Image (tube, helix red, strand yellow):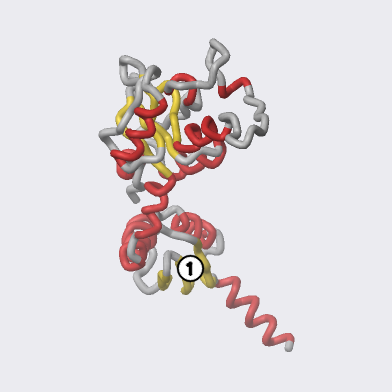
Amino acid sequence: MQHRTVRDVMTPGVVTARPGTPFKEIAGLFERNGVAAVPVVDDRDRPLGVVSEADLLRTQARLPDPQGHSVSLPADSRDSAGTVAETAEGLMTSPAVCARPEWSIVEAARTMDREGIKRLPVVDEAGRLTGIVSRSDLLRLFLRHDTAIREEIARDILDRTLHLAPDAVRVTVRDGVVTLAGRVEEAGLIPVVERLCASVDGVVSVHQAIEHPSTASQAGATAATA
């Protein structure tokens, strides 16, 4: 099996900002390019942090209330001079949590979940920005057609990897949910089949009703006892 990597789903040609990019220019970058965040890079294109719409809105929310209500500004919303942050350097969330092009989709998803973030700048071996990957990019895998998933399981797992007879295990896929039915000679093979099928890109879950010789023996013993 050839699992898709971050390189396969990331967006290259990333819109970026510099540490000194003003608030208003960042908002313009979002509007003109249809993006919700931009990496902030240094003069070598190495990500320093990320500025998102949430960062800009958070700053706006901390401005004085038009009705005169007092608002206390947390220290992280101010630059070194004690004023509200006006440039990417003060607005960005840093350090940037980055991914590598060769990462698996699972690794990228786990990193986003662990860090509580929606996107990852993608960097090369020198730490230079080469792309960006978002939650929606990762979720595109689940748009794979059921037929493609079924064919990959039958060809790459059951045939080429496990060398099972063509009629040993039947595979059906509906809306990404895989159902396996049939018979194998060893009970220990069942969890292997299930695990390999679950790892196929686009699979939502796996249900199995695979039998093995001891299953038949147990059924026979139960019938005889009855």
Q: Residue at x 61, y 76 (%)?
A: 217
- Check the picture and name the quadrant holding the C terminus: bottom right
Q: Is residue 106 left or right of residue 130?
A: right
Q: Nearer the viewer, residue 124 or 32?
A: 32
173 over 4 or under it: above or below: below
152 over 132 or under it: above or below: below
Reading the image, the residue beneath label 1 is 184
Q: Position of residue 167 (x, y in %)?
A: 37, 74
Give the number of marks: 1
Question: Mark 1: which amino acid?
Answer: Val
Q: Residue furthest left?
A: 13
Q: Position of residue 205 (x, y in %)?
A: 50, 62
Q: Nearer the viewer, residue 41 or 56?
A: 56
Q: Residue furthest right?
A: 225
34 over 68 or under it: above or below: below
Asked if residue 205 can be seen in this view, the reply is yes
Q: Secondary structure at mark 1?
A: loop
Asked if residue 127 can be seen in this view, the reply is no
Q: Residue at x 60, y 34 (%)?
A: 65
Q: Position of residue 94 (x, y in %)?
A: 50, 24
Q: Residue at x 52, y 70 (%)?
A: 210
